[in-house]
Image (tube, rainbow, N blue to C red):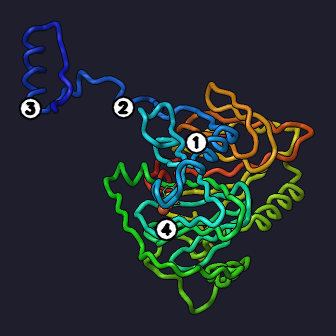
Amino acid sequence: MSTARYHSTEVDLDGLYQDMSEHNLQPLWAMQGLLTPEPVPRTLPHRWRAKHMRALGERAGALVPIDQGGDRRVLACANPGLDGAPYATATLWAAVQFLGPREKAPAHRHSPSALRFVLEGESVWTLIDGDPLHMAAGDLVLTPAWTFHEHHNPSDKGMLWVDVLDLPMVEFMESVFFEDGPSEDVEPKTDLQSASEQLYGHPGLVPAGRAANPSDTHSPLLAYRWADTDAALRQQAAHTGQTDVTMRFTDPVRGGDVMPTLRCQMRRVTAGTATSTHRQTGTQVTTVLHGSGRITVGDQEFDIEHGDVIAVPSWARTTVHADAGSEDLDLFTTSDAPVLNALKLFREEWS
Ligand code: GTQ
Ligand code: FE2
């Protein structure tokens, strides 16, 4: 493997480029598209349709038992701009995970941070460092970096959710670590409330004298329940009279985002209305929980409905239309904004 060889019609210069390439050196003066006036994303605007993912997931369920086909029945959203990489955007992994009746995805941990956003069902428990977290439609469940996690479905109904991970960022920083968990065959505890929610799940209250672990950089609250998110959106809309409202999921102890690399927000667009246009640096992945409509991302327009996943490239303008005569459009979005913020790269614009 050697580096790119630059060319010139001038014989001396061409010879210089040839010799430079032999020493793996390149001339900045001949490069183009390096310091661009604005971001030039490789990520393309894209929509993965729920109906396709569901049909293919069901086929995988029949063909790939979880114990044989690997640990997790996950269909990764692969952005067509990323040369075949299994990434939804340049910075975010997004996937749909299926867990059939009585299936279990075994314990493991990894340096990338993860979250699950539940599309359907209410039969799965995910254990985060042993703490059992129930998963039901509309819930957000965090799997912070390096926490052990495993998924159990003790029911006779299948279940489906969206995973988002910061894996592309961690891979880019050449810092991926993975470890299998101890394989025990004990049935997990299935308390209806996790320890994390018992301690940190009360609005405006955190346990005094029980400082969150100072080495933790993530929210000690690991589940954000749909009933709370729904009420917050409904009341924000009622109070402000706005037809486009957003709630950000935050760390109840430190304030700020739920995990160091990932920002999570839920947006509600009233049926029959359109939003103004927005763009931000960094990439986003959006999942449709309720309603239907259209989203314009850059120069693409996509019809969207429950379960669809949409990739938004950096600095691409987005506008949302919620269908009239349908439910309000509820959109769950994960972005890399905390990372861009920390690096002073975050910009956003409404128009
Ligand atoms: O459920 O633990 O989509 O480790 C990718 C990697 C899900 C998981 C993914 C994972 C998981
Ligand atoms: Fe995992």
| Residue type for callout 2 | Leu
The answer to whether 17 is drawn above or below residue 164 in the figure is above
- Image coordinates of residue 325 in percent, x first then y, are 92, 39
Outermost residue, right side: 325
Q: Which residue is mark 4?
A: 106
Q: Quadrant of residue 102?
A: bottom right
The answer to whether 266 is drawn above or below residue 232 in the figure is above
Sort mark 2 into few (<14), some (14-19) or many (20+) by Cα contacts within 10 Å: few
Specify whether 311 is left or right of 320: left
Q: Which of marks 1 and 2 precedes in the sequence?
A: 2
Whether label 3 touches label 1, CB < 8 Å: no
111, 270: nearer the viewer? 111
Query: Of the residues tagged 3 and 2, which is closer to the observer?
Result: 3
Residue 23 is tagged as 3
Query: Of the residues tagged 2 and 4, which is closer to the observer?
Result: 4
- Image coordinates of residue 257 in percent, x first then y, are 57, 63
Determine the CA span between mark 4 and mark 3: 47 Å
Secondary structure category for the residue under label 4: strand
Is residue 217 in sight in this rendering?
no
Q: Quadrant of the C terminus?
A: top right
| Residue type for callout 4 | Pro
Determine the CA span between mark 2 and mark 4: 45 Å
Residue at image location 44% in from the left, 53% down from the top: 167
Whether label 2 touches label 4, CB < 8 Å: no
- Image coordinates of residue 213 in percent, x first then y, are 48, 82
332, 123: nearer the viewer? 123
Specify whether 181 is left or right of 22: right
Specify whether 211 is left or right of 193: left
Q: Quadrant of the N terminus?
A: top left
Q: Which of marks 3 and 4 precedes in the sequence?
A: 3
